[in-house]
């Protein structure tokens, strides 16, 4: 036992952690075709991490492009930008300092906290304890395992009923580095439990409907961002023949799979996978949604960053059959969100609002028949990006609650 413990400690000490000292995040403003070409060429010749959009293929004229650049390439990037007259600014001066600074709330070592970024182990024990202490409102169900064998648990929130209730499905943490997202799912569960019985809307929602919550979708990736590389996005699956790990779990769904805004290169951050649902996490959730298709009225998926409320389609510029209704609800939800702290959101169909990107969960759920299908991109708009400080967890979750509750109320009214 002791020897094993010691071995474990040694293994932890040896596990490599990626550091980001001296790295910067730039915001580039390409306004000429040459600028776009230049960014793509840059991405080919040096190691650049695309924060927004998520890959060089998605870069177009007149959009803001946020990239993380390793220290060793800084001189070269500055020179290139200046020589080509491209407007830019530095969003993050030193990425490692921002990584360290995001944990700015009082640390709660190992304990779960709604205002800290919890590790997967902590989230996992929270799932166990919150469901066992609220048996009347929560039940849990394991929908499968991740690639590395971690259990994917869906929490079902709602008043027990003898008949089947209509439901909403919400997932967080499809992308590993978007830490504010799992924080929101945990917050939502807490709020649902603590306001049921006092808040009339929450009470009526949970009386009439069930809300399925998957707190962390891409658990392997999330764990990896805590232990090894804060900037990891994809799953952690491996396949012989490529040394690159993982696929983008939001490019792996069977909705125009890999036709646009995704990469077939396993080393890309937007790799669509070897086939639709090749990622076991995607398969598990897709199976769950297919099994519950007849009761599911809404699908919500939480990402960051950019402050957007998107709906189908992203795989095509064609408008969804319910476009105007989806837009109206998104605008109502954004207004509700803004009413608290003035945070402004943009809403619209994915392809036209940001860029075409096929294989996403929102489009897939919508085409399956889940009409109210929305992707949230939470705070911020790039000041911290994925490294949103913990001090912003509370306000972000509070305002997002208003938007989610707005959508839920609308869905409930239109059952
Ligand atoms: N930033 C998100 C992503 O790239 C946006 C998702 C929008 N929906 C979509 N189906 N592409 O995954
Ligand atoms: Zn995302």
Image: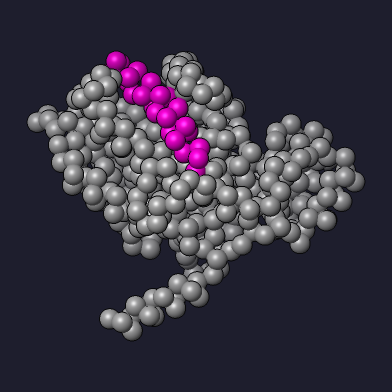
**Residue 317 higher or lower than 114, as above or below:** above
Whether residue 312 can be seen here? no
Residue toward you, 52 or 315: 52
User: Would you say residue 408 sits in the magenta stretch?
Assistant: yes
Which residue is at 31% across, 82% downward?
2
Residue toward you, 297 or 347: 347
Question: Which secondary structure class fits the magenta region best?
Answer: helix
Q: What stretch is highlighted in magenta?
A: 390-415
Q: Is residue 113 left or right of residue 293?
A: right
Horizontal and vertical percent position of residue 295: 24, 30
Residue sitting at the far left: 162
Q: In which quarter of the image is the N terminus?
A: bottom left
Q: In this view, does 258 lie to the left or right of 159?
A: right
Which residue is at 80% across, 46% downward?
38
Identify the colour scheme used: one colour
Horizontal and vertical percent position of residue 55: 63, 47
**Residue 280 higher or lower than 37, as above or below:** below
User: Would you say residue 3 sits in the magenta stretch?
Assistant: no
**Residue 403 higher or lower than 385, as above or below:** above
Which residue is at 76% across, 40% downward?
89
Whether residue 204 can be seen here? yes
Q: In which quarter of the image is the C terminus?
A: top left
Residue sitting at the far front: 106
Horizontal and vertical percent position of residue 213: 31, 39
Which residue is at 17% across, 31% downward?
159
């Amino acid at each position: 036992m002791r020897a094993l413990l010691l071995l474990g400690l040694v293994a932890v000490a040896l596990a490599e952690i990626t550091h980001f000292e001296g790295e910067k995040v730039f915001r580039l403003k390409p306004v000429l075709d040459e600028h776009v070409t230049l960014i793509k060429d840059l991405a080919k010749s040096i190691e650049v991490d695309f924060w927004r959009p998520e890959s060089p293929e998605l870069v177009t004229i007149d959009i803001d492009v946020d990239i993380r650049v390793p220290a060793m390439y800084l001189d070269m990037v500055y020179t290139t930008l200046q020589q080509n007259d491209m407007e830019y600014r530095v969003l993050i001066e030193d990425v490692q300092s921002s990584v360290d600074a995001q944990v700015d709330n009082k640390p709660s070592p190992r304990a779960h906290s709604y205002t800290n970024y919890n590790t997967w182990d902590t989230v996992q024990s929270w799932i166990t304890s919150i469901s066992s202490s609220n048996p009347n409102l929560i039940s849990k169900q394991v929908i499968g395992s991740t690639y590395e064998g971690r259990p994917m648990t869906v929490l079902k929130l709602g008043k027990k009923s003898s008949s089947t209730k209509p439901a909403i499905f919400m997932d967080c943490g499809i992308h590993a580095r978007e830490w504010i997202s799992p924080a929101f799912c945990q917050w939502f569960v807490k709020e649902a439990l603590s306001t049921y019985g006092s808040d009339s809307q929450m009470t009526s929602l949970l009386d009439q409907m069930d809300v399925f919550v998957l707190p962390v979708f891409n658990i392997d990736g999330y764990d990896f961002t805590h232990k090894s590389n804060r900037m990891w996005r994809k799953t952690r699956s491996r396949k012989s023949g490529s040394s690159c790990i993982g696929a983008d779990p939001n490019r792996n769904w069977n909705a125009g799979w890999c036709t646009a805004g995704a990469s077939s290169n396993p080393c890309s951050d937007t790799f669509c996978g070897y086939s639709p649902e090749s990622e076991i996490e995607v398969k598990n959730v897709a199976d769950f949604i297919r099994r519950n298709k007849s009761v599911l009225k809404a699908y919500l998926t939480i990402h960051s960053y950019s402050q957007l409320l998107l709906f189908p389609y992203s795989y095509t510029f064609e408008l969804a059959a319910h476009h105007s209704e989806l837009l109206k609800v998104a605008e109502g939800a954004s207004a509700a969100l803004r009413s608290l702290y003035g945070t402004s959101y943009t809403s619209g169909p994915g392809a036209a609002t940001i860029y075409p990107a096929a294989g996403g969960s929102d489009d897939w759920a919508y085409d399956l028949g889940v009409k109210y299908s929305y992707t949230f991109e939470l705070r911020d708009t790039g000041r911290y990006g994925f490294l949103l400080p913990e001090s912003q967890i509370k306000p972000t979750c509070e305002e997002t609650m208003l938007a989610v509750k707005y959508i839920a109320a609308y869905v409930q009214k239109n059952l």
